[in-house]
Image (cartoon, coloured by chain):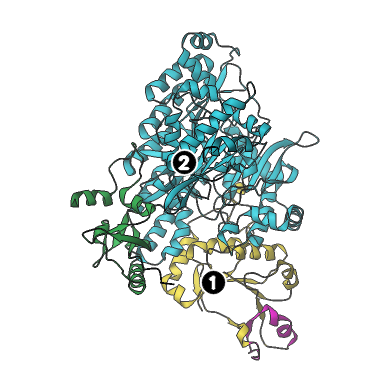
Amino acid sequence: MYMYRYDEFDRQMVRARVAEFRSQIERRISGALTEDEFKPLRLMNGLYLQLHAYMLRVAIPYGQLSSRQLRTLADIADKYDRGYGHLTTRQNIQYNWPKLSEVADILDDLAGVEMHAIQTSGNCIRNVTSDPFAGVAADELEDPRPTAELMRQWSTFHPEFSFLPRKFKIAITGSPNDRAAVFFHDIGLRMVRGANGAPGYEVIVGGGQGRTPMIGKVVRDYLPRGELLGYLEAIMRVYNLHGRRDNKYKARIKILVHELGLEQFKAEVEAEYTRKPQTDVALSEAELARISAYFALPDYDALPERSETFETARASDPAFAQWAGRNLFTHKQPGYAAVTITVKRVSGEPGDVTSHDMRAVADLADTYSFGGIRVTHEQNLVLADVRKDDLYDLWKGLVVAGLADANKGLISDIIACPGMDYCALATARSIPIAQAISTRFADTRRQEEIGPLAIKISGCINACGHHHVGHIGILGLEKAGEEFYQITLGGDATQTAAIGERAGPGFSADGVTDAIERIVEHYLDVRDDGETFLETCRRLGPETFKEALYADH
Amino acid sequence: MPKKPFVPKVVSANELHSGETIYLTASGWSPDIAAAVIGFNAVAAEGLLQRALTEPHLAVGPYLIDVALSDDGHPEPVRLRERMRINGPSVGALNGPPPVSARSRSAAA
Amino acid sequence: MPIIRHGSAVADDWTLIGPEDADAALSDGDVIVPLARLDDALAVERNGRVGVDIGNDADTGTLQGLVGRVDLIQIDFPSFADGRGFSLAKRLRNLGFEGVLRAHGPLIADQAAFAESCGFDEIAIDDLHAARQAAEHFAEIRSVFATTYQEGLEPAGAKRSILSARHAAG
């Protein structure tokens, strides 16, 4: 399997963590730890308390899974939960119904397949996320996964940075086409080349969504690759020393960057970077080389770019053609493609996968994709290395599994947080809104006509549904005891980063779907030939939709 | 200007082991809100909350919620969020058996 | 006040002078004074060492001036969730401070190893806190993790880092 494999050190760390958490649970039960003390400890093991039950968020580092791991996730769903899991907007998976007394056992099962729930919550460094097509994308400068793995290890149980002012999220892209939303993370990294062609990173700090969405700022145009961990340490120390702790809603690094101003923030980081002991660049490089070996290219067949099998099937089977037109991604190896399996069934729950789904995907991965699966931050799955010759057979397998929706990037490929159906923080439900919209737009021809349109729904102002960067964003609030939804327009999570603009007054749960339809109809009226929704929105401004939205109000 | 009338309260929390929704009763805790003891004024409500806080080995994160009284005097939650905590997720063909609290309600019905 | 050093409870050699004792003459022996009193305390001829309590929100610009002047620096943790003190300790070690670093506050046993790795020599917890968390907890938790992923932790060489172990020459 072409992904990182634990050595004995990694295994020891995860086992030790499970032992530690068992001890913490015992001390909570005995009273040696108060709930106040236990809470950050359980959060650092991914264990939330939600509306109806605990929720366990399992880490999927940079979204990468083996089929064996996916089968274990299915087994855990069946054995300890209600037979399903939820794919998150940070490439993790979460279970909604674990019991406290069983969590350590779940962690043991995970440890058996080199998985864990370490630091998926809490005021510490969270899962490092990346491009779901990392390592295979034709447009990639370099594979970001080795760096992501290096950062995963460096950030795990970091003695100095485990009690930060607030959570800390890092993302990395290896392609100039940013599919990791690096401008909306606390630290975003873009892999670049220095003047002499040496590998390195552009370092972006202070992006984020939540209550105060902000686009990250470039702090370093070029950081040599071996200096990464030392430089990250400098950023983290400045944040840990100077980040606000008086107000939870002003505690992210984006606020520090904003309040200091970019130039002063950069000066603080560079001063710390200079004054602290130099980190061992050679050691970093050696470790990166060691990790990179695990991400060697799979044993690809030497194939022509064009597959006759694929072309014939496409010409003869319209349903397959439609799926192929939507759900494939250009692979750098001739004759191969990356496949997106959307988990966005019409009137289903976005991102929810049953144990049956998981096993079906694991089997297909073994047969068609070197046993590897990725989780995307758009709550879908990817099989990254499929021969074009095999695409038709794969698709038929997906049809049997009920996972062949041809809607990648279309209006029914909605991102939604769990919302008030599950989450203790929510002010409104998000899943029923997603269901209503996907039902209204179920017709595939209509979806194709509309084209790429990313709707993102958050059930509260914390924006876990990433609504700020939706082409259409929907934010669920509460007004006079009723659920109430605000619409934003023109958000963009890629390198042309933009925060959506509020359209105007909000809508009731009943009114939101009609509002979306009015927006879509207006778009179809005013768009230029071949223009996507986002392009139209940029050309005409979000104002163009306001009259359509509010004309009758 | 007349004072706003006090909205009756009950104490809700999550059960430590299962995480399920529970309500403080006269003698302990129950997943059934109908059995919850009601605080009819601020002092009584605060007293209930303080009692709840003495049992961290049973209940996590107790807090007061507004209730309205049904015709037969049983408390029912006012906010949608609290109704959700009784009924479970409103979505979920994928959800298996309903949470215990909903089961005991229908059993009692 | 119980002092935890390397997982064991030890006697406290130091007397903590609070800001409210501003006018009290300094007793003999080792004393920890508030930052505002440091200059006075160092000016006096006394029997005993001088330590300073810099609280939690000390201006990082004052840290350099403490190096080489005091034998102990106490850093306060207003809550165990407030990890600023870990970076204050690291900053002080990076600046060359070689005296005793003491963490003071409601740290939990699970933070003891972190504190040591950031350069603390000991943790001072209050009696109420200590009643719930026996020194055994501190000892037990401290040894759960045999190695660390990170380089450059304190004390240098105490706990082998995984990176160093993986790439040890020969």
| Secondary structure of the residue carrying numbered label 2 | loop
- Residue span colored magenta: C22-44
Residue A324 can be seen, yes or no: yes
Q: Amino acid at mark 2?
A: Glu
- Residue that badge 2 annotates: A114
- Say whether residue A481 is left or right of residue C62: left
Instruction: Please tell me how crowded label 2 is: few (under 14), some (14-19), or many (20+) other residues with Cα within 10 Å.
Output: some
Q: Is residue A170 above or below residue A551?
A: below
Q: Residue furthest left?
A: B108
| Secondary structure of the residue carrying numbered label 1 | loop
- Residue that badge 1 annotates: C105
Q: Amino acid at mark 1?
A: Gly
Q: Write down the quadrant of residue C77 in the picture.
A: bottom right
| Mark-to-mark CA distance, 2 and 1 | 36 Å
Quarter of the picture holding the C terminus of chain C: top right
Residue A531 included in the magenta stretch of the image? no
